[in-house]
Image: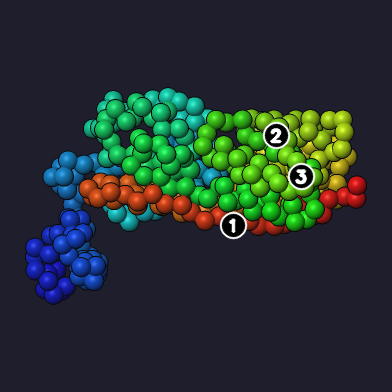
């Protein structure tokens, strides 16, 4: 392999042993990897694990297994892990309400590191007792327990939604807000309030709800049925809540978007299955998961991982339009 790559055996060992950073140039490392692939080289991962004292396994902790968003996070993390000879174990901590229990007798013995999505760092105390590196996704970047954070720009996403609705002429908004005490939902609420503040005549009221379609339907019905001028737009914290809001409008005999506009967040498959299709913000969950795995691998190489933010994009669709005449 050294002959094929035109380098020394020591260089081959550094590259294949993942110890080349800062000692071998990227073009040389790429030449070694290309030679390894051409010659069909496959590392003995069991032997390497024994030598390095690692299991080459990461734990991904998520609030729920039923969410499409977390499935995409897992897919992104697992892809990067597989490219680097790692495996990912997926573990749910229901509702993200801690503390999460260590799923192994000893996390230190079974894992190399932990990635946690959309949770509070203090919910992971049992896992952190093993001294494992922790990367947080969609979580408070000020958390000192995390080696790094990888966050979609949720505040910017809510600013884009608010700007879209305000530009259409909406001034009476209701925030159908997830009743979950986590950084990501606090950021959405803060950003929406800031975007509306200072716009003449614009107000936003909050209607909290559980992260369920039927709970969101009930919350939206309450908001739309209160005495006084009816809200013209329902800003929902995710697409499931938006589906509930659309159900509420239909039950009350209202049309979306002619009588009330509805927005979501996440751009799940559901967003284009609804009729009308949902205006929502797309979060690249796969990119978030991949970024988390890259950060964890960096930490395991002994280098300081870099926190990252992932841009988001508003997709205006048929569920939003100008408000009805006053």
Which of the 4 image quarters holds residue 215? top right
**Which residue is pictured at 52% across the width and 34% down the height?**
182
Give the number of the disc on residue 206: 2
Residue 80: percent from the left, percent from the top?
36, 54
Picture layout, residue 126 above or below residue 295: above
Whichever of labels 1 and 2 marks the residue nearer the N terminus, that label is: 2
Residue furthest toward the right?
A: 326
Quadrant where the N terminus sits is: bottom left
Left or right for 139, reference 161:
left
**Which residue is pictured at 45% across the width and 25% down the height?**
98
Q: Is residue 164 visible?
A: yes
Residue 207: percent from the left, percent from the top?
71, 32
Q: Nearer the viewer, mark 3 or mark 2?
A: 3
Q: Are marks 3 and 2 in contact (CB under 8 Å)?
A: no
Secondary element type, mark 3: loop
Residue 243: percent from the left, percent from the top?
71, 42
Give the number of the disc on residue 202: 3
The residues bearing labels 3 and 1 have C-alpha atoms spaced at a distance of: 24 Å
Q: Nearer the viewer, mark 1 or mark 2?
A: 2
**Observer-nearest of 211 and 201:** 201
Give the number of the disc on residue 103: none
Q: Which residue is mark 1?
A: 313
Left or right for 125, reference 262:
left
Left or right for 276, reference 106:
right
Secondary element type, mark 2: strand
Picture layout, residue 63 above or below residue 284: above
Q: Nearer the viewer, mark 3 or mark 1?
A: 3
């Amino acid at each position: 392999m050294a002959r094929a790559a035109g380098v020394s055996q020591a260089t081959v060992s550094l590259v294949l042993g993942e110890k080349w950073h800062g000692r071998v140039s990227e073009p040389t490392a790429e030449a070694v990897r290309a030679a390894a692939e051409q010659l069909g080289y496959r590392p003995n991962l069991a032997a390497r694990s024994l030598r390095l004292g690692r299991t080459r396994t990461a734990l991904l902790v998520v609030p729920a297994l039923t969410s499409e968003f977390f499935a995409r996070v897992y897919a992104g993390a697992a892809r990067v892990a597989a490219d680097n000879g790692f495996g990912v174990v997926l573990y749910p901590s229901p509702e993200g309400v801690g503390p999460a229990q260590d799923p192994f007798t000893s996390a230190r013995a079974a894992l190399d590191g932990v990635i946690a999505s959309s949770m509070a760092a203090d919910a992971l105390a049992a896992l952190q007792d093993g001294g494992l590196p922790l990367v947080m996704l969609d979580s408070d970047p000020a958390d000192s327990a995390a080696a790094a954070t990888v966050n979609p720009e949720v505040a910017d996403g809510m600013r884009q939604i608010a700007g879209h609705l305000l530009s259409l002429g909406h001034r009476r908004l209701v925030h159908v807000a997830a009743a979950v005490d986590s950084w990501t939902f606090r950021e959405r609420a803060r950003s929406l309030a800031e975007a509306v503040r200072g716009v003449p005549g614009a107000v936003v009221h909050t209607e909290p709800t559980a992260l369920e379609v039927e709970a969101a339907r009930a919350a939206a019905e309450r908001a739309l049925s209160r005495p006084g001028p009816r809200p013209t737009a329902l800003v929902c914290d995710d697409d499931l809540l938006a589906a509930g809001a659309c159900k509420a409008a239909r039950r009350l005999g209202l049309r979306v978007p002619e009588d009330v506009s509805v927005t979501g967040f996440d751009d799940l498959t559901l967003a284009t299955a609804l009729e009308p299709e949902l205006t929502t913000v797309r979060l690249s969950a796969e990119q978030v998961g991949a970024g988390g795995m890259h950060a964890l691998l960096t930490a395991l190489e002994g280098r300081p991982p870099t926190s990252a933010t992932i841009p988001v994009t508003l997709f205006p669709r048929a569920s939003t339009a100008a408000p009805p005449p006053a």
